[in-house]
Amino acid sequence: MQAYYSSSVNIFTIRTKQTGSQDLTLYLQDMYLLTNQSSSLTYDWNDEQQILQFTASIDNARVGGEYRAWIKDGCDNQLWDGSIQVYASQSIDKPEYKTQANDGYKSNLSTNEYIIME
């Protein structure tokens, strides 16, 4: 299973079967809604280890969604099949702390902001 993070760039690295075709297509089927979508891939290929690296985007991806996924080449050979699970963005949202120690005054009415006194 591959992890797909919403609101971020998703780069997948997978090992596939050998192909001589330059045209690769990613097919997705939503496991809940049974809707299908496909997109051609822009990719990097490591011929020695048969590793395919590509960037993917899923239209209308919902957090918690699951997709059957497969990649076919231009000759209709199936190179890889698997699944993709959609997760929420994993960026860390840190609160922005404000300090009033260097502003020349020590107290002020604030609107739910953290005040760090040094």
Image: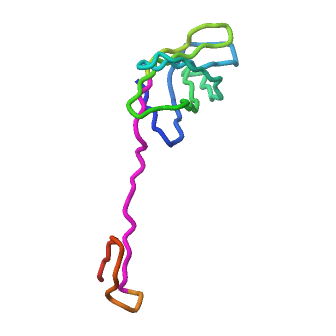
Residue at the extreme bottom of the image, as rendered: 104
Looking at the image, residue 81 lies above or below residue 58: above
Residue sitting nearer the eye, 36 or 24 = 36
Q: In which quarter of the image is residue 102?
A: bottom left
Left or right for 73, reference 36: right
Which of the image's four quarters has the C terminus? bottom left
Q: Residue at x 51, y 30 (%)?
A: 12
In x, y percent, where is residue 55? 58, 33
In x, y percent, where is residue 82? 45, 17
In x, y percent, where is residue 1? 40, 23
Residue at the extreme left of the image, as rendered: 117
Residue interval drawn in magenta: 84-101
Mainly helix, strand or loop, the magenta region?
Answer: loop
Q: Quadrant of residue 65?
A: top left
Q: Residue at x 44, y 25 (%)?
A: 84
Looking at the image, residue 91 lies above or below residue 79: below
Residue sitting nearer the eye, 52 or 40 = 40
Q: Residue at x 41, y 34 (%)?
A: 63
In x, y percent, where is residue 100? 37, 83
Looking at the image, residue 114 lies above or below residue 12: below
Residue sitting nearer the eye, 93 or 74 = 93
